[in-house]
Amino acid sequence: MPEKVKAASYRSIPSVERLLQMPEAESLIMNYGRPLTLEAIRCVLDNLRGQMHATTSNGESPVSLDRTAILDLANEKLDEWLRPSLIPVINATGVVLHTNLGRAPLSRLAVEAVRAVSTGYSNLEFDLERGARGSRLIHAEVLLQKITGAEAALVVNNNAAAVLLALTALARRKRVIISRTQLVEIGGGFRIPEVMNQSGAKLVEIGTTNRVHLHDYEDALQEPAALVMRAHQSNFRIIGFTTEPSLAEITVIAHRYSIPVVDDLGSGVLIDTARFGLPHEPTVQESLAAGADLVCFSGDKLLGGPQAGIIIGRADLLARIKKHPLARAVRADKLCLAALAATLEHYLRDEAEREIPIWQMISLEPKKIRARAQRWAKQIGMGEVIAGQSTIGGGSLPEEMLPTFLLALHVPQPNHFLARLRAAGPPVIARVENDRVVLDPRTVLPNEERALLYGLRFALNP
């Protein structure tokens, strides 16, 4: 195409100013603001110039320059830019603490507590009685003391931070003794040896991969040490030819040499899991009773609250930890503290099983799950209800299952159907088992059922 014709084609592209004078542009500016609308229009026009260059060079049909169409493209661009990346989804996988899906959903009371302190000001660091500056550390500490019997407590932003802070504050450049059976890695590449190294502590490994004895601890304690650490094997098990002392036995040896014991418990369960047909998971209270001087655990695993790292134990050790500069860098914010305090209240009121979503799910009777699955099959007009297994997940109770019932769908291209479910609003996350798409009612909250059925119909009728 001659250069003059090509130049004329480019000149036919409407200017930004002309497009902004259109009534449709006023609506975009009202919804998205003038600066972002300008950027979107310029982006669309740049794309049109690029397309025009390609079509005119190849002798193809010219690009449409309809002004309304250009503003429609700008609107699509604005929607794309401002579409939130973090959105609610429906968990129909049967994994109760699904790490990729945000682990524990919050209770109604916890959500209300977050809303209450986030829509205005709060007494986060203000002492109402004295009318002077207070401390954010108190808001969950008293509740944790009442529930666990600990002398003191501290809440930080996650359990990795809790472990790092405790080691940094108490054992920097000093020896920390840990069994090789506990050099664990959890999700996201969090490795106990690397965290210990990052804290500046000197890692002292004892025992072997599968066996450690009390005399290994005794031998290591012949030289000065700052801490003995135990990391709970929350996401795997060592079976077969194994030996490992109990926490109580470890604390007796450590205390004989006046060395504190830190128990990284991980999941942070406060009630007996055996009540629900699961193996007994060591509780936070049991760690303290066994003699641990500090216990670190998560808020969003089996505790059922927000993401948090919690350290409880001896007041003198926690006083040192609270004063360390790193404590400010990893401190919990007001939303976390509000949600955690509300979650802890459920335990104090002895209503965790009734009010905390993960315990509602874990305690759900199979016959009620089957009834829900049958209702889903009836409402969408297809599907088979089959027996299945739910899992706890979240690095808690590895390989342990709960009996459940699944809605199984025989559909062509199961993975394509999963993608369709994920494209629904809200997205539905399911799984494939034996070439069938299966959905587990255990992890679908009651108020999500209508949206789940909409998502199924959406996926079944493309």
Image: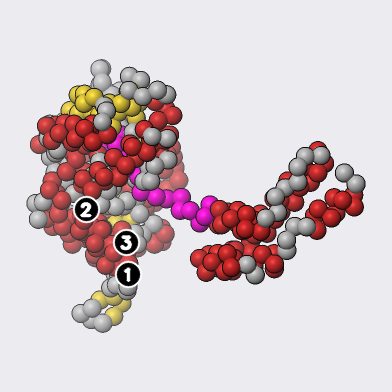
Q: Position of residue 407 (x, y in %)?
A: 25, 29
67 with respect to 145 (left or right): right
**Residue, disc 2:** 107
Which amino acid type is marked by label 3? Leu
Q: Earlier in the sequence, mark 1 or mark 3?
A: 1
| Position above or below: 7 against 286 | below
Q: Position of residue 8 (x, y in %)?
A: 84, 55
| Position above or below: 54 against 277 | below
Question: Crowding near pointer 1: few (<14 within 10 Å), some, many (20+)?
Answer: few
Which amino acid type is marked by label 2? Ser
Q: Secondary structure at mark 2?
A: loop
Q: Which residues are the magenta region?
A: 79-97
Q: Earlier in the sequence, mark 3 or mark 2?
A: 2
Which amino acid type is marked by label 1? Thr
Q: Residue at x 70, y 67 (%)?
A: 18
| Image quarter of residue 44 | bottom right
Looking at the rendered structure, which numbered label has been put on residue 119? 1
Looking at the rendered structure, which numbered label has been put on residue 335? 3
| Image quarter of residue 340 | bottom left
Q: Residue at x 44, y 42 (%)?
A: 197
Q: Earlier in the sequence, mark 2 or mark 1?
A: 2
The CA span between labels 1 and 3 is 11 Å
The CA span between labels 3 and 2 is 14 Å
Magenta highlight on residue 84: yes
